[in-house]
Image (cartoon, grey):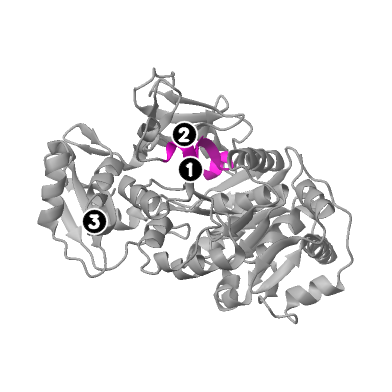
Amino acid sequence: MYLTQGLRRSAARNPNRTALIAHGRNYSWCEFQDRVVRLAGALKNIGLGSGDRVAILAHNGAEYFEFSYGVPWAGGVIVPLNNKLPATDLVYILNHSGTRYLLADRAFEPLIEGFTRQLESVPQVLYFAPGDPESPYERALAAAQPIADQLRGYEDLAGIFYTSGTTGRPKGVMLSHRNLLWNAMSGIINYQLDESTVYLHVTPLFHAAGGSRVFTMVTAGVTNVILPRFDATEVLAAIPRHQVTSMLLVPTMINRLVREPELADHDLGSLRTIAYGASPMPQSVLAEALRKLPGVGFCQAYGMTELSPAATFLEARYHVLDGPDAGRLRSCGRPVWGADVRIEGEDGQPLPDGEVGEIVVRGPMVMQGYWRDPEATARAVRDGWMHTGDAGYRDAEGFFYIVDRIKDIIITGGVNVASVAVEDCIHELDTVAECAVFGIPHPDWVEAVHAVVVPKPGRALTADAVLAHCRARLAGYQCPRSVEIRSQPLPLSGTGKIMKAELRNPHWRDRGA
């Protein structure tokens, strides 16, 4: 099992069909493969050795696809960089990973040139500018000779995907060729992909959720439409223009898409599937999406970077508001092919159905470990089981339900409160655009439930209205003790997740927490 095999197969089957659409240009499968092989040759020309790390700092684009296949074709290891990270974190990742070569969009050149003196070993940088045939990247490809596939595969390291680092230094998740290909095969089955699929890439390709889709879609031979970043109006325009059939969005993107005033003005008849994941989905947002996009089948995958990234899957048939299957809407699904998933107690023993514990996963999707961090690896993977840090339970039919991130559970007066449940309640208010719930210090209860809420544009919302709504629907201990109304959107990570740590930290800063 090696990643480049999927590209060779798709190019052999449909050499002249469109593989990529990016920056106003179409690339056939034959042309895409030729550019991959030439990039591999260019990397070899500047000294890339087997297992050397090659990073990329860019927005989504065709070059990301070429990087994802050209580096392994040349025998290297990919290191996608989160383009939202500050220079300090980028320096840490480049040094920690031992990156020797860096592909970068020219837009990031001032940032890169500003921190090169902090690097332990300055990588060779190859800049590109989408649409510029005279960029160093394009000149290197034009001058390079194609090389034979180095055929790294199976347990060889394919990529190091760094986590967001919201609770400390980013950790480098080591994923093998087998990890990523197993996820690709599982995704093809779950999402029923074939060569008629037109897939829209709008989630960041530096993240495992979006980046793994590169390998899934190339292996399936679909047509890939690539937008540089998420913009609701651009997404709505791209769907009819390219007859998009499928895409992945994180919950905050779905929330903003269904709130877009121009939603009804676009013909979205080609769209068959919207997948979601990466963070909890407010039930009110999902219900609104189901009502506004009745012809679209919604589905979700649950997982994490350390699981390549999917562990469970909930099919479109369970994304309904009425009927016998409606009760599954809060579930994250059942295990994907090859995954053993169970709920463990604090003693490491399996818990019976219905009891809340930690979700743990075993199978060919579990990471090799954390790069240069054996202690963290040993804590996370025990006896082959990846400990996710998510609290959840399983029902009698094998469906899993996430209660909360263990670190996000609020312990107030000795009672556990799931922040996700409170957020779901607040999102029921039709005046709410975004919200985040977390614990803040309390002199008697240790923690108190606190909510930060952003109203929809032009809608009035008060803290008293939020509190009254929660008191009518939640147990007393679950209700927020304080509510902050904000006019500005909540801070998001590069992957579109609400950054609770950034909201929480000011409240705990003076308490050493």
The residue identified by callout 1 is: 300
Lower position in the chain sequence, tag 1 or tag 3: 1
Q: Which mark is residue 138?
A: none
Q: Quadrant of residue 485?
A: bottom left
Residue 87 visible somewhere in the drawing: no
The answer to whether residue 406 of the structure is visible from this angle is yes
Q: Position of residue 198 (x, y in %)?
A: 63, 56
Q: Which residues are magenta?
A: 301-319
Q: Is residue 1 magenta?
A: no
On-image quarter of the N terminus: top right
Classify 448 as above or below 67: above
Q: CA distance from mark 3 to mark 2?
A: 27 Å
Q: Amino acid at mark 1?
A: Gln
Q: Are marks 1 and 3 in contact (CB under 8 Å)?
A: no
**Image mark count:** 3
Q: Position of residue 324 (x, y in %)?
A: 38, 30
Q: Residues within 10 Å of mark 2 (few under 14, many from 20)?
A: many
Please state which of residues 483 and 502 is positioned toward the viewer in this rendering: 483
Q: Are marks 1 and 2 in contact (CB under 8 Å)?
A: yes
Number of the front mark, 1 or 3: 3
Q: Is residue 287 above or below residue 236?
A: above
Check residue 333 in the rendering and tell me which mark sits there, or answer none: 2
Picture layout, residue 132 above or below residue 180:
below
| Residue at (71, 43) in percent of width and height | 177
- Left or right of 298: which side holds 181? right
Q: Residue at x 17, y 55 (%)?
A: 483
Q: Which mark is residue 430?
A: 3
- Earlier in the chain: of badge 3 and badge 2, it is 2
